[in-house]
Structures are given as structure tokens and as C-alpha cells.
Amino acid sequence: MSFAVDANVLVYASDETSVFRDRARDVVYEVAAGDELVYLFWPVVMAYLRIATHPTIFETPLQPAAALRNVERLLDLPQVQTAGEGRRFWRAYHRLATDADARGNLVPDAHLVALMEENGVRTIWTHDRDFRRFPSIQVSDPFATV
């Protein structure tokens, strides 16, 4: 079994002001201690780096070097896999974006779901409710009880 992690889980783990910080850190520790295959897709990594270092989003943004170290720690784990767009990506994206009428913030969500489909990943850990618009995946919200 495998799953993908969305950027908001990583962002909450780094945001000292987030009410979700403790739970997000627990999720990251669970990933680190587990043996399940975890997909950390490149758009998620880039979104994390963009948000965690952004001075108008984070009250105390991370320094770029610190954010990069956080990503490297995850990528060094043997159970964490990265993947990018392959030959089947565009067709999957086109279908998903059309079915969900993807525009605005739903565009990167459709991008991520297309990557998931291309790599056989059915579950995403995220707090983003928009992913529920894609019936081909299962959304697991690690913050549902927080």
C-alpha cells in the first residue's frame, strides 16, 4: 500500500502558529518511522518550499536552507518516493481537469491527482477538501479530529 502527502501537511508541521502543527509533526514522524511507501510528488515539494519561506504567509518564515533541509530529510528516507510527469500524465490531467472543471486553485490539485493516477497511488493525506472532487482517489484528513 502507498499514499501521497499533500503540501499542507508539511506546511502545518513547519508553521509554529498553526493549530495543526503538533498533529502535522506527528504525521511526519509516522511517515519517517513507517515502512509504507510514501509519495512526495515534486509539485508538493515546490509548494512547501514556496509557502514555508514566504514572508506574507508565515509569521516567521523558514530560511530557504532550513526548508530545503526539511525536504532532504524526507527524501533521504528509503520509503519516500518522488515522481514526476510521465507519458500518461497529460491524458490523465486532461480527463481529471475536464471532469472537475478545474480552474484556479483546483488546477494544481488536478495536477497532483494525475501524478497519483500515473503512479498507481490511490490515497492522499491532506486537509484540502477540494481533493474530494476527484472520485478516483481516497482522501485521508489527518486533522479531521483536531
Image (cartoon, helix red, strand yellow):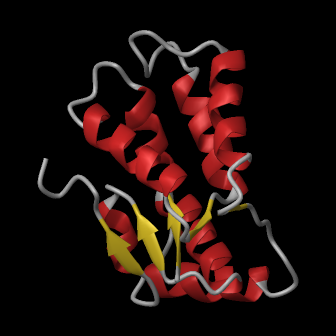
- Residue 72: give x, y in percent of width and height: 72, 37
- Residue 91: give x, y in percent of width and height: 74, 88
Q: Choose between 146 and 73: the one closer to the eye.
A: 73
| Residue at the (63%, 25%) spot, across then down | 67
Quarter of the figure with residue 14 = top left
Q: How many marks?
A: 0
User: Furthest-right residue in view?
Assistant: 87
| Residue at the (49%, 88%) spot, across then down | 99
Where 119 falls versus 48 (above or below)? below
Quarter of the figure with residue 78 = bottom right
- Residue 19: give x, y in percent of width and height: 20, 31
Q: Choose between 111 and 31: the one closer to the eye.
A: 31
Where 75 falls versus 119 (above or below)? above
- Residue 81: give x, y in percent of width and height: 71, 63
| Residue at the (69%, 27%) spot, across then down | 69
| Residue at the (46%, 15%) spot, across then down | 56
Where 4 falls versus 57 (above or below)? below
Horizontally, residue 8 falls left or right of residue 113, namely left
User: Furthest-left residue in view?
Assistant: 145
